[in-house]
Image: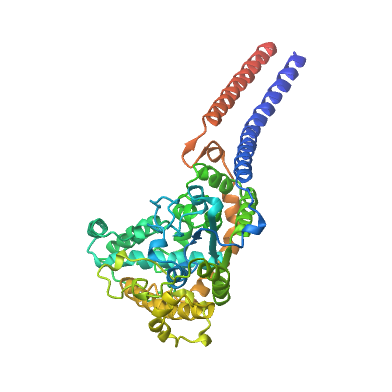
Amino acid sequence: MARAARLGLLGARALALLVVASVALLPLVSSDDGYRHCERVVRGWADSSTGREKDGDKLSLKDLLFFLHIPRTGGRTYFHCFLKKLYTNAQECPRSYDKLRFDPSHPDCKLVVTHDDYSLTSKLPRERTSVVTILRNPVDRVFSTYEFSVEVAARFLVHPNLTSAKLMTTRVLTKSRAVSTLDIWPWKYLVPWMREDLFARRDARVDKEHSSKKINAYDVEDMVMPLHEYINDPVAHEIIHNGATFQITGLTNNSYFDGAHEVRHCVRQHPDLGHIVLDVAKNRLDQMLYVGLTEDHEESARLFAHMVGVQVLSQSGTLNLDLKEDLLSENDPHPSMVEPEEEEINEHLNSTHGWQNNEALNSTSDEQGNGNMTVGKLMEAYETCIARLRKSQSNRRKISLKKVAEANFSKEARKLEHLMLKAQQSVVGPHRQLAEQKGWTDIICSDGICSPWMVVMLGLGIAAIIALLSFAVTTRRRTSKLKV
């Protein structure tokens, strides 16, 4: 009797340990399998993306120039004040800054300028295409993206409600042939999102007394979505976080590569796989004709003129120095339907170079026919152009933000907010790591999609646990009968 009781007790303990082991091992096995799958996906994509060109080719300008414009890096100034001078309108590929609708084999198409990511090269003749881009400090770029989202969305607040704003937008876009900010990635996602939030906050404070005591331009929550909410939202995670890296590697949510979402998801779920994507990005940059830096704007502009400008001039001998069609009109009747961007780029310009070269714009019409443009004259035209462009953009920004006046973005306010976010991160970081530990639902389902294999495994695990528990109960009953 005693022996049977001991055997029954040992059996029950063994079964209990087996149950605990099965419960603990199921998610670990599932998680490990998910990691291996993601590693295969990411490495497979990387292996297919590392085709190198000959080093001797990368510094020579080819037939087609693809300016991969990473948002909020100052690229619009290059477009208006360099490229529009180096290429004629006929040479610019149509529908720049939009999903392109053109035949890249067309002999007159020499310039592609777009926010489309690197995957666009799959639609271009790669052996005849040179790529250039500009990079910026990621933190500053995130701040600038937030500020521009607010600026453009605030232009719609002249309408009485969101429905009216949408109707007017549709009406204007239908009549106009121009490319709107709302057509352009990533603004076609970020601006409507911010616009809807601005109207919701305005409606919520209609009957409330508004407080004007806020001193933090990035946390005026009764008027504008605070920066900390903005950067932690899933929309921002999808588009803004690591945005430049994903754009250079062709993995944005605007990618021509069908597997971009899976690679992006795997890297987010397993951050240690990110170094693989980073290596591909570095390789891509190494193969580009030119890479500029927003923080070193003056030197980068000179380098662009000498590396790219000289080769374009030597190939074509033509130059367009008419600013009338390049600069944005300050009297635009549809302020919410204009193009971006960068008056803040002026923080990086050296004022000692001066802006006294306005005569260059009025005296270079003959040079277009004479073909005697030099790099020095190109830089003079660039400096004059950017001075006028920054003035136009600064005025537009002031007008746009009138409806949300307390969002008074400035260099000083940005530095203060950055310090505050860093302080919060140092406190919240350890707690967030604990909160982000994956539970069963995180392993089985991701982004609302549940893996059938994971569901089956979970079902089998639960069934096994129930069977083991039933066996343990039956064993205990038999042991009790033996005692009696």
Question: How many numbered discs sit on the rendered protein?
Answer: 0
Residue 212 appears in view: no
Residue 458 left/right relative to 334? right
Residue 470 position (above or below residue 354): above
Determine which quarter of the picture holds residue 163.
bottom left
Residue at image location 43% in from the left, 74% down from the top:
343
Residue at image location 57% in from the left, 63% down from the top:
425
Residue 140 position (above or below residue 372): above
For the C terminus, the image quarter is: top right
Q: Nearer the viewer, residue 78 or 57?
A: 57
Determine which quarter of the picture holds residue 311.
bottom right
Residue 224 position (above or below residue 268): below
Q: Nearer the viewer, residue 285 or 15?
A: 285
- Display colour scheme: rainbow
Determine which quarter of the picture holds residue 444.
top right
Residue 10 position (above or below residue 183): above
Q: Nearer the viewer, residue 417 or 297?
A: 297
Residue 88 appears in view: yes
Residue 227 left/right relative to 330? right
**Residue 127 position in % (x across, y down):** 56, 51
Residue 372 left/right relative to 154? right
For the N terminus, the image quarter is: top right
Q: Nearer the viewer, residue 42 or 236?
A: 42
Q: Which residue lies furthest to the front in this view?
A: 370
**Residue 178 position in % (x across, y down):** 31, 61
**Residue 54 position in % (x across, y down):** 65, 54
**Residue 170 position in % (x across, y down):** 25, 56
